[in-house]
Image (cartoon, grey):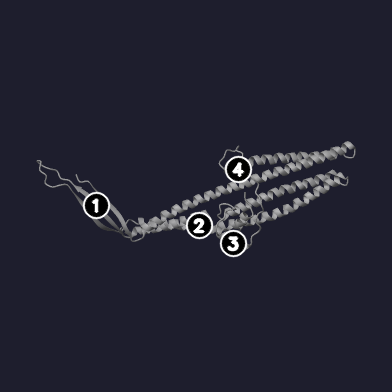
Amino acid sequence: MAPGIQLSYLILNFGGGRQAAVEQALQEVYSANHTYNQAIQDAILEVELAYYSLCATVSAIDFADSTLQETMAALDAAKLRMENGTGAELDVLQAQAAYDRAQYAKAEASGRRKIAEGLLAKVLSLPANTSVAIAQPAGEFPGLLEIRDVRALIEDALSQRPDIASLRSVYKARLAATRVAAAGNKPSLHLISSAMQNTYETFGGKEFQDNDWNLGATLSLRWTIFDGFQTKNSWLTAMANAEASRLQLEEAEIAATAEVWNRYHSYETALEKHRASTAFLKSASKAHTMAVEAYESGLRSMIDRLNAEEQLSLARKQSVESRLEIFSALSLLSHATGKLSGNQSQTGSSPVINQAKNQGAQP
């Protein structure tokens, strides 16, 4: 018997294939890590949007309660006037219709809140019937940014978004794969070492030689001269894959710039709508107060009072929707720039992120 072992170790590949293979493996790991980070950011965005949606439904219920109380007061006043002989049945019917409409709005708001609670529980990986306590976002939101700041946001997106970074790693990995394929046409130097045990059998009880070991080491230069164009075809395939990755990366970068631009202007529009809705709510509240006083003084009809209440209800609805739109737009803008959330603090973060943090525009 002659047991033994032989080891072959690649010392040098003149085409750089070994280094390229290591680079390819590393870039594939980096890509997987960036993809994981993107999944985390997507999950955080889902939670933020679900949270703000629930906050909006809570505010909507509060406003619906206020509208219900006001229409109830109008209905009581109309009934009282009719009992005193100074009012008409038409006023009572109109007030009753407004009260019924307010009840409908209250029921609708309550249903939306239940749905929003279930959605928030879902994104938190909780059963839908789980009660999640929330607090309304405090503070003000940041104001408009200048165009140069939008460009800074775009630069942030291109440098920090995990999905873009993942595509860059994929591109680098496929470039490395082209070098691996090209190295197949280059010579390689191998170190071959072997160890074998020599054993000897005895005859007639007499030993001729003791068992011993045979050790050896050699250097081997290998070079594939012709392999039926297999190496060349592998290289062409790798080059095509690398070019496809480059085009995919370029397309993703253009899409990212467009997304940041659109998200910013959506936020800009949401701010303008909120300012208008705030002014509308202020004027509608004042008009409603004056309409109620004028009706009680006999200077205005019930229809004037109900019209004022309808305008006030609409103003409240727009106020809730515009506030939700601002917070949602801010979260989407932060996500588009590659941030975990709007209140993330880190060196070189974008102005809108820092402003949101400093002004408390996050839960």
Q: For the residues marked 3 and 1, what is the alpha-carbon distance in whole angstroms?
A: 63 Å
Residue at which label 3 appears: 151
**Image quarter for residue 82?**
top right
What amino acid type should be assigned to the residue bearing mark 4?
Leu
Residue at which label 2 appears: 249
Of the residues under marks 1 and 2, which one precedes in the sequence?
A: 1
Q: For the residues marked 4 and 1, what is the alpha-carbon distance in whole angstroms?
A: 65 Å
Q: Residue at x 74, y 39 (%)?
A: 103
**Image quarter for residue 80?**
top right
Q: Position of residue 135 (x, y in %)?
A: 64, 45
Q: Is residue 209 left or right of residue 319?
A: left
Of the residues under marks 4 and 1, which one precedes in the sequence?
A: 4
Q: Are the two marked residues, 1 and 2, in contact with CB atoms closer than 8 angstroms? A: no
Residue at which label 4 appears: 120
Q: Position of residue 197 (x, y in %)?
A: 20, 48
Of the residues under marks 4 and 2, which one precedes in the sequence?
A: 4
Q: Position of residue 250 (x, y in %)?
A: 51, 59
Q: For the residues marked 3 and 2, what is the alpha-carbon distance in whole angstroms?
A: 20 Å
Residue 194 got which mark?
1
For this rendering, which residue is in front, 78 or 169? 78
What amino acid type should be assigned to the residue bearing mark 1?
Ser
Of the residues under marks 3 and 2, which one precedes in the sequence?
A: 3
What amino acid type should be assigned to the residue bearing mark 2?
Leu
Of the residues under marks 3 and 4, which one precedes in the sequence?
A: 4
Say which of marks 3 and 4 sits in front: 4
What amino acid type should be assigned to the residue bearing mark 3?
Arg
Say which of marks 3 and 2 sits in front: 3
Q: Residue at x 10, y 43 (%)?
A: 206
Q: Secondary structure at mark 1?
A: strand
Q: Secondary structure at mark 3?
A: helix
Say which of marks 1 and 2 sits in front: 1
Q: Are the two marked residues, 3 and 1, in contact with CB atoms closer than 8 angstroms? A: no
